């Protein structure tokens, strides 16, 4: 099983120019296309990604984070064979990096949300009837269970790298154990141009302390083999 | 509801849910991401706005809204419901 390294970057309130100075030149140009909180998220996400790539032992100075054809972050500038996923919420950015080979890489995605009261568990946009029933059936408080299920689903969505115009109905949470912090998410709609078997993602959830409270992190990995 | 009234609903929900939108001018050309919204915040804003405007938008259509103007187009186009649970 390939190693997946994760790294965090918390917003310490430094001026945006100071944060931006730590980015690669290409990334600085990209960051300037954004403003306000989105710009800070963009920068923190890239810094977290560089930290995760560094932990993999890749010569990170020659790499920068660009965007792939659907706008998802992707490593550019080298043939090092590294893939990444980035997420941010509130004052925290998180990224994961893993080694990959062209055409043979596993699909992995990460998501994070600040733990807070939410009514997403009852949202018909976010969840199918079966998913809402699955969330309701747990012993965990509905607000927390809904948030955990959403983060799991988002991590799988990022792993598939759907384009932005694909909604949450493209995936479905099938297994959900909020006490054990695990979930299983299946692909209901294939990504355009792909004809292989529908994918299943195993999701590990964890709760961690952020600068302004607790955050939930989900790491989704495509299940391979039988 | 008129488009302006629906926009007021959306803006009010954004100000409540998205920290980066509080006290900011919000235009139809902007997206919730411009205010630093995460995916959960965006879903919450949309869900509450549909409920308050008594409109239901299909998930497949909603995913294609690139900015607030697109969201308002969908809300305007959607038939008014007697009761909406989102």
Image (cartoon, coloured by chain):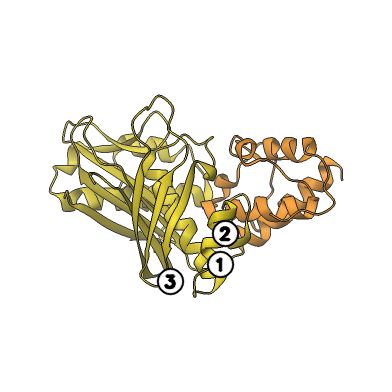
Q: Chain of mark 2?
A: A
Give the class, few, some or many, for how many residues have Cα within 10 Å of label 3's Cα (few <14, many ≥20): some
Q: CA distance from mark 2 to mark 3?
A: 24 Å
Asked whether the residues under the numbered discs 1 and 2 touch, taking CB atoms below 8 Å apart as contact, a structural biologist would say yes
Residue at 42% across, 56% down: A152
Residue A136 circle label: 1
Q: CA distance from mark 1 to mark 2?
A: 6 Å
In this rendering, do the residues under marks 1 and 3 share a single chain? yes
Residue at 46% across, 53% down: A173
Q: Is B70 situated left or right of A99 in this image?
A: right
The orange-tinted chain is B
Q: Chain of mark 1?
A: A
Q: Is residue A146 visible?
A: no
Which colour represents chain A?
Answer: yellow
Residue at 43% across, 71% down: A214
A214 or A187: nearer the eye?
A: A187
Give the class, few, some or many, for how many residues have Cα within 10 Å of label 1's Cα (few <14, many ≥20): some
For label 3, the SS is: strand
Q: Is residue B38 above or below residue A100?
A: below
Give the class, few, some or many, for how many residues have Cα within 10 Å of label 2's Cα (few <14, many ≥20): many
Q: Position of residue B10 (x, y in %)?
A: 72, 50
């Amino acid at each position: 099983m390939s190693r997946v390294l994760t790294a965090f970057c918390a917003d310490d309130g430094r001026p945006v120019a100071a944060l931006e100075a730590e980015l690669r030149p290409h990334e600085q140009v990209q960051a300037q296309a954004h403003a306000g909180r989105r710009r800070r998220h963009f920068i923190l996400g890239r810094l977290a990604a560089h930290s995760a790539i560094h932990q993999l032992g890749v010569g990170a100075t020659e790499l920068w984070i660009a965007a792939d054809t659907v706008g998802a972050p992707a490593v550019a500038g080298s043939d090092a064979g590294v893939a990444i996923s980035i997420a941010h919420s509130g004052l925290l950015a998180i990224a994961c990096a893993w080694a990959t080979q062209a055409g043979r890489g596993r699909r992995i995605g990460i998501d994070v949300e600040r733990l807070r009261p939410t009514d997403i568990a009852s949202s018909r946009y976010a969840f199918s009837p079966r998913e809402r029933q699955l969330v309701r059936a747990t012993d965990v408080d509905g607000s927390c269970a809904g948030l955990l299920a959403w983060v799991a689903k988002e991590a799988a969505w990022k792993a598939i790298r759907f384009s932005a115009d694909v909604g949450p109905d493209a995936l479905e949470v099938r297994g959900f154990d909020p006490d054990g912090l695990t979930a299983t998410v299946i692909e209901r709609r294939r990504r355009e141009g792909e004809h292989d078997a529908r994918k299943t993602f195993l999701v590990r959830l964890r709760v961690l302390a952020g600068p302004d409270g607790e955050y939930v992190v989900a790491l989704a990995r495509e299940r391979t083999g039988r | 509801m008129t488009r302006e009234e629906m926009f007021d609903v959306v803006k009010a929900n954004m100000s409540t849910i998205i920290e980066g939108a509080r006290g900011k001018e919000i235009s139809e050309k902007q997206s919730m991401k411009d205010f630093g919204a995460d995916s959960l915040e965006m879903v919450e804003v949309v869900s509450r706005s549909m409920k308050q405007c008594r409109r239901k938008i299909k998930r497949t259509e909603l995913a294609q809204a690139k900015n607030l103007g697109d969201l308002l187009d969908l809300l305007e186009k959607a038939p008014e419901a007697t009761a909406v649970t989102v």
